[in-house]
Amino acid sequence: MAGTPQQPYGTPPQPVPEFAPQVGRQPGSLAPKVWGIILLILGVLGFVLWLVGIVSLGGGGMSGSSFAPNMSPEAKAELDRIAQVMVENMKGRWSFWLNNLIELSIIVLSLVAGTLLVIKPKPVGRKLAIARALVVLLALPIAGYEGFTALDENMEMQIGLQKIQAEDMIKQEEARSPSKNDKERADRRQRIERTFDSVQPIMRGAGYGFLIFSFICVLILNGLLLLFMTRPAVKDYMDNVAKGAEQVIPGYDPSMGYASGPPPGYGPPPDSPQ
């Protein structure tokens, strides 16, 4: 019939199967991976620092005099005595032991939550991440009390160290250039002591500022962790991860958040017969 398109060799056209639409990244799939990696890093670093602190508390590592090689033997002995007093005071504080126990629990929560968010995704990982953030926020007052108490004792140690250093410096100057009289000796002592005294407020202010800045960073970080882990999209994604064995979409990898390819059984159109 005129006007009717003719097929080659009289073969009717083969229907071209439609490929299933590619599934993009699932909503809520990015946050668990990012925060899982962050929690794993924090957990590993926290464990290393916690272990170093426990070892140092038990007497391992260098003594205080190791950092002052130019001191006289008497000054080194006094410095070690001050450091030992600080350690004993630390062991006697309830806040020190409670803070260490909380830190260890946070480390465990970080490692387990990070693993269950990014390595072996499971819905419980999101819940553990939320629990981790809540424990940190609730423990901030205890950490703050212990931090400022330890800082005050450290400042006292620094004051004692500065007095020792001042005495050593006075002896060294007297050995190099003996004072002519008592007035010159007193003026030299006042000058050296005034120099060390002027440094104390700067050191104390820097210590307090660093602690406050650290607590603000902890507050922001864990606030963001709570914000992301409580989002409905993240909850839905982690719940869907638990159903990975019963995938409705063939080829969908829930741990990656996107489909790995076209569903099985579909392929390119069959070759047309020659």
Image: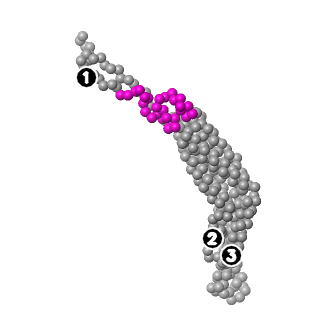
Coloring applied to the structure: one colour
Q: Main secondary structure of the magenta part?
A: loop
Q: Quadrant of the N terminus?
A: top left
Q: Is residue 47 left or right of residue 250?
A: right
Q: Is residue 238 visible?
A: yes
Query: Which disc, if any, is residue 66?
Result: 2
- Check residue 246 for magenta coloring: yes
Q: Which amino acid type is marked by label 1?
A: Gln
| Mark 1 or mark 3: whose residue is earlier in sequence | 3
Vertical order, 143 against 224 (above or below): below
- Within-10-Å neighbours for mark 1: few <14, some 14–19, many 20+: few
Q: Which amino acid type is marked by label 3?
A: Ala
- Within-10-Å neighbours for mark 3: few <14, some 14–19, many 20+: some
Vertical order, 42 against 272 (above or below): below
- Within-10-Å neighbours for mark 2: few <14, some 14–19, many 20+: few
- Check residue 115 for magenta coloring: no
- The residue drawn where x is 75% and y is 55% is 94
The percent coordinates of residue 109 (x first, y second) are 63, 46
* Span highlighted in magenta in the image: 240-268
Q: Is residue 100 left or right of residue 116?
A: right
Mark 3, residue position:
75
Vertical order, 185 against 248 (above or below): below
- The residue drawn where x is 50% and y is 38% is 256
Mark 1, residue position:
274
| Mark 3 or mark 2: whose residue is earlier in sequence | 2
Kind of element beneath mark 1: loop
Q: How far apart are the two marked residues, 1 and 3, measured between alpha carbons?
A: 100 Å
| Mark 1 or mark 2: whose residue is earlier in sequence | 2
Kind of element beneath mark 3: helix
Q: Quadrant of residue 212?
A: bottom right
Q: Quadrant of residue 69?
A: bottom right
